[in-house]
Structure formats: structure tokens, C-alpha cells
Image (spheres, coloured by chain):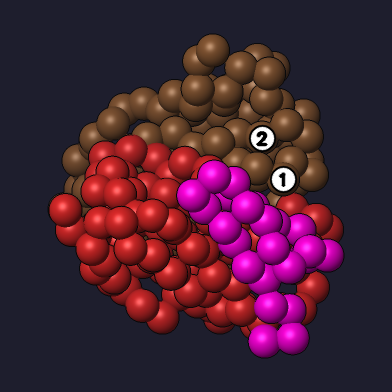
Amino acid sequence: DQQVKQNSPSLSVQEGRISILNCDYTNSMFDYFLWYKKYPAEGPTFLISISSIKDKNEDGRFTVFLNKSAKHLSLHIVPSQPGDSAVYFCAALKFTGNQFYFGTGTSLTVIP
Amino acid sequence: DAGVTQSPTHLIKTRGQQVTLRCSPKSGHDTVSWYQQALGQGPQFIFQYYEEEERQRGNFPDRFSGHQFPNYSSELNVNALLLGDSALYLCASSLGLSGEKLFFGSGTQLSVL
């Protein structure tokens, strides 16, 4: 049972515009949410995270929004740059059990 | 500061064989988790090791086993390989059982023929 879902396999955005990547989850007991970025032939690298008690976290060009009532989070990248082209994974964590659940990923292409 | 290192980077095996993958965690980390990433899927949790013991396990059969050594490095063993075991195997390290952030290695690409 997929507890974390990314329903958009791919997204294309013009350089300089906003990229919005979406993620839905089913388990209301998740404590923490993270976004990872993955380039080909590399492991995922941590990008940004948010605690379940917050609704927004910002780090430079990256902002993550959490809507607990909708069980939805999104990653905003502004402005998008060609180097942002990668696969982005949403992940959720329950502190009890300490198991990370990953979505299937969204491949972002930023067009110069 | 060395990150998470995995070996080998690529591996080709045939059905029924056994394979061992290796991982050294990021310096200062004591917890190692293993993930399987099939093509087009997200990483799926296999198990987690802390203090040389398996602490958590995902929905994987007993053919998947592991070990953690006193220096925190870890091995993933898969017996009786199936074609469906072909995937990228990712090792991730963290600090403590409740680490909020995983640091991943580049993975081992396993192909089972």
C-alpha cells in the first residue's frame, strides 16, 4: 500500500518560472516530511524538510508547504534553474518505527 | 568528510545466486538503512541496523538479510536471487534511531539475468 504518492511522473518548466511539485499521503500519523533530489547515477540528496506541526518551511529558492487536513504537501522552487532538473522524491517519516516512506518521484525538467 | 560509500557500483548475477552489497556510513553516523529502488519507483525500505542489530524491517522476504559491524559499516545479503530483485540498492545512514535525515550513497545497481 503506497502511503506516499506523487501523481505527476514528470514536469517541465521554463527557466526563471516557478516549479511546483506535489505529494499526497494517506497516514495522518507521519511526523516529518522531506524532499530529496536525485540525479542519474547518484543517490538521493536531502533538499528540505518540514515537521508535521508546521505548515511552511523555506530555504532559499525552496519552500515546502504542508496541508495536514488535505494530507498534501508541495515543493515550490522559485526561480527554477536548469540545474534543478532532476527527479524529486517526497518522503514521510514516523518517529515510532523510524521508517521513511517514499513517493515514486517526479522528474523535473527546467528548460533554458 | 566522507559521505556514504557503497560497493560495488554495478553487479550482474544470475537467478538463484547469492549477492553481498557493502556500505560504509557517513562519518559520525551509527545507523544504516537499506532501500530497494526498482525502475520507475521510489526507494522501498528493506531494513535498518543500529548497534549491530536489525531494528526495523520492511515488507521483504527472509532472502534479504543484513549485518552491521562494530565500525558501523553494513552488508546486505540477498539469497536465491530472482529476476525481480533487479534494482538499485541504496544504503542510507543517519545518527541514532530517530534520525530525521537520511544521507544516501550512490547505490549498487544489481541486474539479475
Q: Chain of mark 1?
A: B
- Horizontally, residue B29 falls left or right of residue A54, namely left
Above or below, comparing residue B76 to residue B15 in the picture? above
Where residue A105 sits in the image (x, y, percent)? 39, 65
- Horizontally, residue A47 falls left or right of residue B81, namely right
Q: Main secondary structure of the magenta part?
A: strand
- Horizontally, residue B13 falls left or right of residue B30, namely left
Q: In the structure shown, which secondary structural element does the residue marked by tag 2 occupy?
A: strand
| Mark 1 / mark 2, whichever is N-terminal | 2
Above or below, comparing residue A49 to residue A67 in the picture? above
- Look at chain B in the picture and name its colour: brown
Where residue A70 sits in the image (x, y, percent)? 67, 87
Above or below, comparing residue B92 to residue A93 in the picture? above
**Could you tell me the amino acid type at mark 2?**
Ser
Q: Is residue A58 magenta?
A: yes
Above or below, comparing residue A96 to residue A48 in the picture? below
Check disc 1 and report the residue beneath it. Answer: B100
**Could you tell me the amino acid type at mark 1?**
Glu
Where residue B67 sits in the image (x, y, percent)? 60, 32
Chain drawn in red: A
Q: Is residue A10 magenta?
A: no
Residue plotted at (60% across, 41% down): B102
Marks 1/2 in contact by CB < 8 Å: the verdict is yes
Q: Which residues are magenta?
A: A48-70
Name the residue nearer the viewer: A48 or B21: A48
Check disc 2 and report the residue beneath it. Answer: B94
Residue plotted at (68% across, 18% down): B28
